[in-house]
């Protein structure tokens, strides 16, 4: 008998999320499946509007009210399906089992409460510390995310801190419940480049210490290459390619992935004009039956435009590399 | 915090000083008080005597300083219309009734409008929101005197639960207070609703939710405290206008307040009383706005440390 591998800590299966505007429905997450193992970092890559943030909000079940809702699918967290849980049950999942870091640190802390107040609130909700030791725990967390002068910063308000410092606090808040999974939704986009690197380093350290799984949402392939073990590429609400970072970067198998990789400028190569993908991503109610990328794809034919491509093994030949493209074998 | 409040207090005092200048000048712009005080057939000697007696022959700056000095100790001279009483006495007699009624109307406005506005935002586009909108719309379109009369007809005349009019206990205040408050409830509800809608979209609300805060706490602890700046700003105007009395409501309910007093004094060219009333109102407005400043500072650290 072969040993069964560890089950994934987070397993999303055929997730479909829609926004409802009266009689009009728009599907923003279309049949998305992926899994993350303990201690693993999964990158979710895509342009704005590709459904990556909506996927994250679906997992947390904090979709925009009242228009957002999960249509179907399963979200397994450590053997429990989160879809269908009551709001009360979800409150105990949020923070305690899945933490989240938002994009813009300048707006994601409440301006009228001190950093300490917001951190202690998270600790209290997640019952990870006794009330006597809350403040001590909070300061320890601030130190853990490398906030200098933590005792003083505990009493500071968000407007008295820099962006990088605030994002560290948001990171500390997400750690307060010692979650199994941390979803980071473009956490470094609003930071200076030097601060970005420090922040990524911090996430790596935390993962090494705690073994938490990280879902890292970004449009920055450089970060994916540096931080992630595996990635999924999303386009117009669907996953078009998935695999290990090495496989996908070495043998991109979907024309969209290839185009994304070509769009990354290189300092060592001099070009007259930076590469850009022709056309615009579709608005989500424009998408037809076929491959969503067909309208912008140089290889598309009638089959691509009318029928959704199957999930096939990718060009690397690895068993965990997949892409959804009719032309997978045709394009050299 | 103290520095901020001291700063605001100095502002209020400067405003008060400017108002005294205006009040003082207005009484001089609106004709010679001697004409109003003496009969038409007064002799030049009588006019001159009275002018000297009242100090109107002295330089204008001296007159102003004297006015200021007397005003500081509450001496605005004798009332011309209500013989034998000082202007301050006339106004002070009416003040408690106005403050009682205005205070109750203010309380009703805040207690009804704030929860209504918050819930209307939370349950946006539901039946609840629609009901709140209708209540707000009614308040802004029904004239206060008409509302007062209808309330009186229903609750005092037909049902007999409350007295029709006059000054007395709490039961006398309910109908006029509701009539005054309804219009304000509308404005305050709509302001609170829109402020809450904006805040509920903020990223820190999303963060509060993803860290596991219960919805009740998200709304009141995280959202409302940020949204409160808007209704608090309006509270200054609200308190000012309710506490200075309403001529219409006082007339409909035969309520002995300062709104009615102000109009009567103006019509009777009773300048000492007019000046006193205007200064009282100004002080009330300044106090209300000072309270608003204090509330700002309590609620928002960014203002407190500015």
Image (spheres, helix red, strand yellow):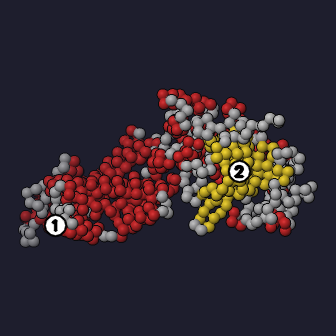
Pinpoint the chain carrying mark 1: B
Who is closer to the viewer here, B165 or B21?
B165
| Residue B295 x, y percent position in the rendering | 39, 46
| Residue B62 x, y percent position in the rendering | 22, 52
Say which residue label 1 marks: B268
Q: Residue at x 36, y 70 (%)?
A: B141
Q: CA distance from mark 2 to mark 1?
A: 83 Å
In the rendered structure, find residue A13 and report the number of the disc placed on it.
2
Instruction: Specify whether B201 is left or right of A281.
Output: left
| Vertical placement of residue A107 versus A120, above or below | below
- Answer with the quarter of the image where residue B165 lies: bottom left
Q: Residue at x 52, y 44 (%)?
A: B213
| Vertical placement of residue A183 versus A46, above or below | above
| Vertical placement of residue B119 versus A182, above or below | below
Q: Quadrant of the C terminus of chain A?
A: bottom right
| Residue A181 x, y percent position in the rendering | 66, 40
Identify the element where label 2 is drawn: strand
Crowd band around label 2 with a 10 angstrom C-alpha radius: few (<14), some (14–19), many (20+): some
Pinpoint the chain carrying mark 2: A
Who is closer to the viewer here, B107 or A37?
A37
| Vertical placement of residue A320 versus B164, above or below | above
Q: Work out whether residue B56 can be spotted.
A: no
Q: Residue at x 48, y 56 (%)?
A: B122
Identify the element where label 1 is drawn: loop
* Nearer the camera: disc 2 or disc 1: 2
Crowd band around label 1 with a 10 angstrom C-alpha radius: few (<14), some (14–19), many (20+): some
Q: Mark 2 near mark 1, Cβ–Cβ under 8 Å?
A: no
| Residue B61 x, y percent position in the rendering | 24, 54
């Amino acid at each position: 008998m072969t040993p069964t591998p560890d089950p994934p800590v987070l397993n999303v299966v055929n997730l479909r999320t829609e926004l409802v505007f009266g009689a009009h429905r728009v599907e923003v997450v279309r049949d998305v499946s992926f899994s993350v193992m303990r201690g693993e970092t999964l990158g979710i890559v895509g342009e704005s509007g590709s459904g990556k943030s909506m996927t994250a909000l679906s997992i947390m079940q904090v979709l925009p009210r009242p228009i957002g809702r999960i249509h179907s699918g399963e979200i397994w967290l450590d053997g429990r399906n989160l879809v269908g849980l009551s709001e009360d049950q979800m409150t105990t999942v949020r923070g305690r089992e899945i933490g989240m870091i938002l994009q813009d640190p300048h707006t994601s802390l409440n301006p009228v409460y001190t950093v300490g107040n917001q951190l202690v609130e998270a600790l209290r909700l997640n019952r990870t510390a006794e009330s006597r030791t809350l403040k001590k725990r909070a300061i320890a967390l601030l130190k853990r995310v490398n906030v200098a002068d933590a005792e003083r910063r505990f009493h500071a308000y968000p407007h008295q801190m820099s962006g990088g410092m605030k994002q560290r606090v948001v990171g500390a808040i997400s750690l307060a419940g010692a979650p199994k999974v941390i979803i980071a939704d473009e956490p470094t986009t609003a930071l200076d480049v030097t601060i970005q690197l420090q922040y990524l380093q911090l996430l790596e350290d935390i993962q090494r210490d705690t073994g938490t799984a990280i879902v890292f949402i970004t449009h920055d392939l450089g970060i994916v290459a540096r931080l992630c073990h595996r990635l999924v590429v999303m386009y117009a609400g669907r996953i078009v390619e998935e695999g290990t970072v090495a496989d996908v970067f070495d043998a991109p198998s979907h024309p969209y992935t290839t185009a994304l990789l070509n769009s990354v400028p290189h300092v060592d190569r001099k070009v007259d004009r930076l590469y850009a993908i022709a056309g615009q991503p579709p608005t989500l109610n424009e998408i037809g039956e076929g491959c969503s990328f067909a309208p912008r794809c140089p290889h598309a034919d009638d089959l691509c435009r009318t029928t959704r491509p199957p999930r096939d093994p990718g060009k690397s030949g690895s068993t965990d590399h997949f892409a959804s493209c009719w032309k997978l074998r045709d394009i050299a | 915090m103290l520095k901020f409040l001291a700063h605001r207090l100095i502002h209020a005092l400067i405003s008060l000083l400017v108002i005294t200048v205006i009040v003082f000048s207005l009484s001089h712009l609106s004709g010679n008080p001697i004409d109003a005080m003496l009969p038409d057939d007064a002799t030049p000697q009588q006019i001159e005597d009275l002018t000297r007696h009242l100090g109107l022959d002295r330089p204008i700056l001296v007159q102003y300083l004297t006015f200021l000095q007397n005003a500081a100790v509450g001496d605005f001279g004798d009332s011309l219309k209500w013989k034998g009483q000082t202007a301050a006495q006339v106004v002070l007699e009416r003040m408690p009734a106005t403050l009682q009624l205005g205070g109750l109307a203010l309380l009703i406005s805040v207690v009804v409008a704030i929860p209504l506005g918050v819930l209307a935002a939370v349950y946006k586009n539901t039946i609840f929101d629609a009901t709140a909108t209708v209540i707000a719309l009614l308040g802004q379109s029904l004239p206060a005197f008409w509302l007062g009369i209808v309330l009186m007809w229903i609750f005092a005349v037909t049902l007999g639960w409350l007295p029709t009019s006059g000054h007395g206990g709490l039961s006398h205040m309910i109908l006029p207070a509701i009539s005054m408050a309804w219009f304000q409830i509308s404005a305050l509800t709509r302001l609170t609703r829109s402020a809450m809608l904006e805040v509920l979209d903020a990223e820190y609300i999303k963060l509060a939710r993803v860290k596991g805060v219960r919805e009740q706490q998200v709304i009141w602890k995280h959202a409302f405290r940020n949204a409160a700046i808007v209704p608090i700003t309006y509270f200054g105007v609200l308190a000012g206008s309710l506490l200075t009395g309403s001529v219409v409501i006082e007339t409909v309910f035969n309520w002995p307040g300062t709104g009615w007093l102000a109009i009567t004094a103006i019509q009777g060219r009773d300048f000492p009383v007019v000046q006193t009333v205007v200064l009282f109102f100004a002080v009330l407005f300044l106090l209300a706005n000072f309270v608003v400043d204090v509330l700002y500072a309590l609620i928002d650290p960014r203002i407190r440390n500015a």
